[in-house]
Image (cartoon, rainbow, N blue to C red):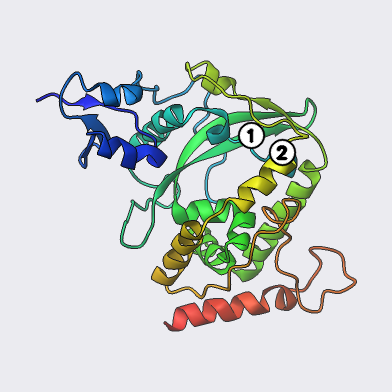
Amino acid sequence: MERIWLDVPFEEKDEAKELGARWAPDAKRWFAPRPGMKRLERWAALPEIPDLLPGEDRSFGSGLFVDLVPSTCWFTNVRSCVSPKDWERLRRMITRRAGMRCEICGANQDKETHRWLEAHERWAFDETTGVQRLVRLICLCTDCHTVTHFGFAQVRGLEDAAYLHLMAVTGMDETQAYRHVQGAFGLWRARSARTWELDLSMLTDAGVTLQRPPSAKERPAAAQEAFAAQDDAIRQRATERAKAEGIRLRALTPPTPPDSATNPSPRPIPGQAGSAPGTASATETTSWLSRLVGRRRRR
């Protein structure tokens, strides 16, 4: 029998299942088992989003790197600007066109080790016009996504895991990895000093309806509210993922205010007091990271 596909956001899957929706493991999608089920009409499938969005540059931002969002742009991400149903359509398109694998390291989804496939945005920042423009949507595994949002990795106690994955995928040594992270935070601080105008025309031209994101003045309060709303389940998943990889997980601390939580500064360098950022010697910069890598190799 032909399946009647549904667009069910992840957060609503339990409700949809209770109302009669069924999961198709082969298609990784929910469907109605028979026509005329009015209780499922709210999830009726919309037209598929094209694999190449209007104006999308799929070569933009290739490889694995720390890609921090300026604090003045927090909560202007795609997920915050579209309905849950449209986000499900976008997420499904992104993972499907990537062949259900991470577009950076090639890993697939692995439920046992809590490695998922996630959607990530690549943004172009025009310093002249002050425009933050969506250029690409990319499928990342949990590990690559953790590196990309390095500030959030620090908040969740996954900084060590992020460093190790960054080096494993890119071939960087300890010094290169540390300086790469420092450079990313320096760029983040510079971009966070100004307000950016959001350009999501890549989505609107594909027929996706946008919701108004928080204004620049509203974003600090929105960030504070979001951190307060982080529940034990999120932290537990982070703990389980780190343990599954055999990586030491530092104690998770309560979220701090948004001006320092999402993108805190990199780990302080021993013996660097009074020196300019980025001027520490290779030994000072990577002594703790070298020990971490050494422990990892001895396992």
Q: Is residue 79 above or below residue 116?
A: above
Decide: few, some or many residues near mark 1? Use Cα within 10 Å; few <14, some 14-19, many ≥20: many
Q: Quadrant of residue 299?
A: bottom left
Q: Is residue 289 above or below residue 241?
A: below
Decide: few, some or many residues near mark 2? Use Cα within 10 Å; few <14, some 14-19, many ≥20: some
Q: Which mark is residue 76?
A: 1
Residue 5 image offset from top left, x and y in percent = 25, 26
Residue 47 image offset from top left, x and y in percent = 35, 18
Q: CA distance from mark 2 to mark 1?
A: 9 Å
Question: Split into 4 quadrants, where in the image is the N terminus?
Answer: top left
Choose the circle earlier in sequence order: 2 or 1: 1
List the single residue furthest toward the left. Answer: 1
Query: Which residue is found at the position 74% from the left and 39% from the top?
Result: 72
Q: Secondary structure at mark 2?
A: helix
Residue 210 image offset from top left, x and y in percent = 56, 22
Quick check: marks 2 and 1 in contact, CB under 8 Å? yes
Left or right for 137, reference 268: left
Residue 287 image offset from top left, x and y in percent = 67, 79
Query: Which residue is found at the position 90% from the left and 71% from the top?
Result: 274
Left or right for 156, reference 220: left
Q: Secondary structure at mark 1?
A: loop
Q: Nearer the viewer, residue 251 or 277?
A: 251
Query: Which residue is found at the position 82% from the left and 37% from the top?
Result: 194
Q: Which residue is mark 2?
A: 219
